[in-house]
Amino acid sequence: MFESILVVFVVTIFIVIGIVIYASLQGNSSQRDAITELRASRVQHSALTMPEFTCEACGGSLRDNCFDTAKLDAFISLPSATKDKYYSYFGKSKLAVEQKYPQEMRWNLYDKSGEGRIRAYMPILLCNATQNTYNFGVLIIDVSPQ
Amino acid sequence: MKKGQAEAQFNWIFALVAGALILSLIVGFMFRQQQISQDKANEDNLREFQGVLSALKLTEERVETIKLDPGVSFGVDYKSNVLIMGKAQAEITTDVVASPRSLTGRELDAWTKPVMMPAHITNVVFLSPSYRHYVFVANNVNDPDVKEFYGLFPDSINKMLATAFGTDATVQNILQQPDAKIRIVYINMPVQNKAALAPKRISEISLNLSSGTVTFGTKRYPLYYNSDMKSIMPQIAVLVDNGDDYNVTVTRIFDRGEEVYKILRLRAAQLSNIYQWDCRDIFSQAISPFTELENSRNVAGNYITLKSYYDEAESAGCANLY
């Protein structure tokens, strides 16, 4: 009788320990996702306000959420050692800009991504400085957990 | 002693040792859990603060008050560019922050300024605890340069302008507030060593606006002070604790400038190939000052050159140069 009670007691303790460990791992994983989402939003903010991309030089009144295509061309021509300096702003992530209209184009700006990404999209304007025209595009950010 | 008695005593000793061991394990576990939850709370606070700084950086010329929960205090490590709270650390994701090393108290005054050299390089976020007072000392407080410099700081911070003659009374008045700390800023005059009155509560620097230098203790640093950039570097000097922090912050701004000018130089080269006639000439001429700005801190000379090219490009109907 005493042995049976002891076995039930020990098994119950194992089950409780198992549930606690499972719950804490689940909690950690959802917290990690929340942190990665927060980081994705910060990377997006950084990219949208960086003078390396923004439309200040286009001269028009449209400046918010706007990238200068000549600056994007300049940025992708940078050697990878120079792009490494941007790790402090973008960390483990991937940044690309896709022009959707009038014709499709793509600029792969930065790629230091790892596994398990969270993807964020942001519609943006793309300014062509020489023609003083604005096209439509999207900023795509893939952020991996740090 | 009989065998049964010895066994009973041994059982007691065994029970005591086992009990103490289990108790110490439980207590150790509790302390560890407490430490883990404290570290987690610190990390959460840091992340929240990091978010506030990132949001502030998006604005220009904005003044805000950040309320801190009791017991929450942050440290700024300029060399590693990180915020610290307890054992937790978080990178300063905004480019440039200028503040004392310790950010404590109930409120922080925060304001932002754009760095234009002459292109927009970044926004600097200035942070000052509300217990910090700024006393600007000048021989002539009606001097337009002194007034203009004093006006650069937002009215929400504890600031006042005093003559050299009236400094003692002003400082003694502030020192009556128990938690107050004072940064005395001597404009165009040497430090007068008022810190001897309360060494842990008073710090002093001297700004020479005409020669463009700032003195922290015995060390002197350039202010990069010219008519267009005057609002940034001297403000950083007033906010940070020492010359090393000033130097690191200024270097970070120039590093940002180098990155931005690299892109503007490549853009100018690219546009000079696309354009014809006047615009091509203007953009190809601008490559040289951009290159110089990438490689040196000769801001003043290239500033004027680039501004003139900017105006030429604008009047010729080309795209903006920066």
Image (cartoon, coloured by chain):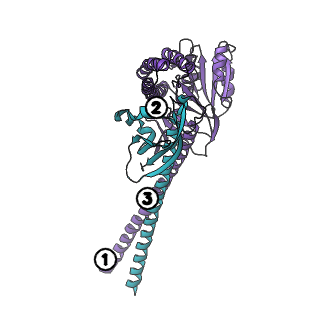
Chain colours: A cyan, B purple
> Which residue has dot 3 on it?
B28
Which image quadrant for residue B171?
top right
Q: Which residue is drawn at 49% across and 51% down?
A: A37
- Residue at 51%, 24% in the rendered image: B321
Same chain, marks 2 and 1? no
Tag shown at residue A70: 2
- The chain carrying label 3 is B
Image-based side of A74 in relation to A124, left or right: left
Label 1: chain letter = B
Q: Distance between the residues labelled 1 and 3?
A: 39 Å
Frontmost residue, A143 versus A125: A125
Say which amino acid is labelled 1. Met
Residue B1 is tagged as: 1
Amino acid carrying mark 2 in the image: Ala
Q: Which of A51 and B67 is in front in this view?
A: A51
User: Which chain is mark 2 on?
Assistant: A
The CA span between labels 2 and 3 is 60 Å
Please, is residue A81 above or below residue A118 in the view?
A: above
* Quarter-of-image position of residue B164: top right
In the picture, residue B295 is in which quadrant? top left
**A72 above or below A100?**
above
Residue type beneath disc 3: Gly
**Which of the two residues, B144 or B122, is positioned nearer the viewer here?**
B122
Q: Can residue B85 be seen in this view?
A: no
Q: Residue at x 58, y 45 (%)?
A: B71
